[in-house]
Amino acid sequence: MTTNPIIAFKHVSKSFEDNGQLILRDINFELEAGKFYTLLGASGSGKSTILNIIAGLTDATTGDIYLDNERINDVPINQRDVHTVFQNYALLPHKNVFDNIAFPLKIRKVDKAQIEKRVLEALKMVRLTGFENRRIQKLSGGQRQRVAIARAIVNQPKVVLLDEPLSALDLKLRTEMQYELRALQQKLGITFVFVTHDQEEALAMSDWIFIINDGEIVQSGTPVDIYDEPINRFVANFIGESNIVSGIMIDDYLVEFNGKRFESVDGGMRKNEPVEVVIRPEDLRLTLPDEGKLIVKVQTQLFRGVHYEIIAVDELGQEWMIHSTRRAIVGEVIGLDFEAEDVHIMRLNETEEEFDARIEEYVDEEIVEAGLINAIEEENIKD
Ligand SMILES: Nc1ncnc2c1ncn2[C@@H]1O[C@H](COP(=O)(O)OP(=O)(O)OP(=O)(O)O)[C@@H](O)[C@H]1O
């Protein structure tokens, strides 16, 4: 629960009149002021619709929307203290940079001297000082993007909504703008709600991520939490590359897969409950065959610049992807080692509330750090 959320959605659903299909199903969240939030999901999952409901560009079919504790369902667009940055920037092409940025202030009848002061400040923020008189058509893609952002912040709205604002930029510029946007948000302390389908972008920029699939929030949390403890196969695959295998939970902190038992730091399941086990490719280390927890045979290897991407197969025919700075030889038999905290367990069909409660109770940093879990040894003694 957030005290004084800047935006709150309570049981928000949306269907469009033409086909009645539910585009958003019972969306609930509270956003804290001054944070960078990201809505991450595939195309068509409903991210833009959530943003448009906040902006007032579309109405919720049911549910309540609050901005700074005021219910805004019926507040017109121009009276909502939010600003949207669109993917195509929506700049006025024949006006210069100054007039584009001044536009929201002119509408609000801010006096001329104030407009000048605030536009120049906004330009400085986005590192475009000196570009006031430049025509929009004479700007590069990255510069246009900066003008759109300057226009969004010039009025210091309570919330800035950004709908895939970096997707038209090439990779290098996009990475640069990711840093800039994040720094700008932190400097201004304005809440940003950012929409993207790019998981790396979401992980790099956000304080908090909402994963949206098919009109529902599948999981929400900090980038590290979501990366480390995906709630299900969909999230694990969506956020980065993963090895996912079927397993059985023997006991808290002890899981069986590939016919062997391994320590993990997850608990709270039923004994012998079928689960899925996630191990990230970068958490697998190459060892000599007899020193590994798994024995595998290398099938392919690709050099990816920062690491080798190795695909190897174990004796049961299960494929494992490994990211390693050490190279292997195709056809070689190697061992794979990993730590208990890298063995992430996912229950089948667990809701986000059940997941959060279980994680809070069982995945305890102190337990991990203190090394209190030595389930395998205990199990061996019992045997
Ligand atoms: N005005 C509309 N009328 C009918 N259906 C719509 C309308 N706007 C969006 N939709 C549908 O709602 C669903 C969610 O769209 P939305 O634009 O929110 O998804 P998104 O996750 O932002 O995807 P993208 O990344 O492609 O923009 C899609 O299936 C889309 O076809």
Image (cartoon, helix red, strand yellow):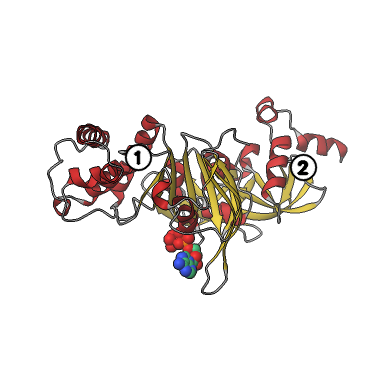
Please state which amino acid type lies under the numbered disc 1.
Leu
Residue 57 shows in the view: yes
Question: Residue 102's x, y, as percent?
Answer: 24, 42
Query: Where does label 2 land, which residue?
Result: 268
x 25%, y 46%: residue: 103
Is 299 in front, or is 3?
A: 3
Image quadrant holding the C terminus, namely top right
Image quadrant holding the N terminus, namely top right
Q: Which mark is residue 261?
A: none
Q: Earlier in the sequence, mark 2 or mark 1?
A: 1
Identify the image quadrant of residue 127: top left
Question: What element does badge 1 sit on?
Answer: helix
Is 121 in front, or is 38?
A: 121
Q: Which mark is residue 181?
A: 1
Residue 296 shows in the view: no
Q: Position of 247 compared to 297: left or right?
A: right
x 38%, y 36%: residue: 185
Question: What element does badge 2 sit on?
Answer: loop
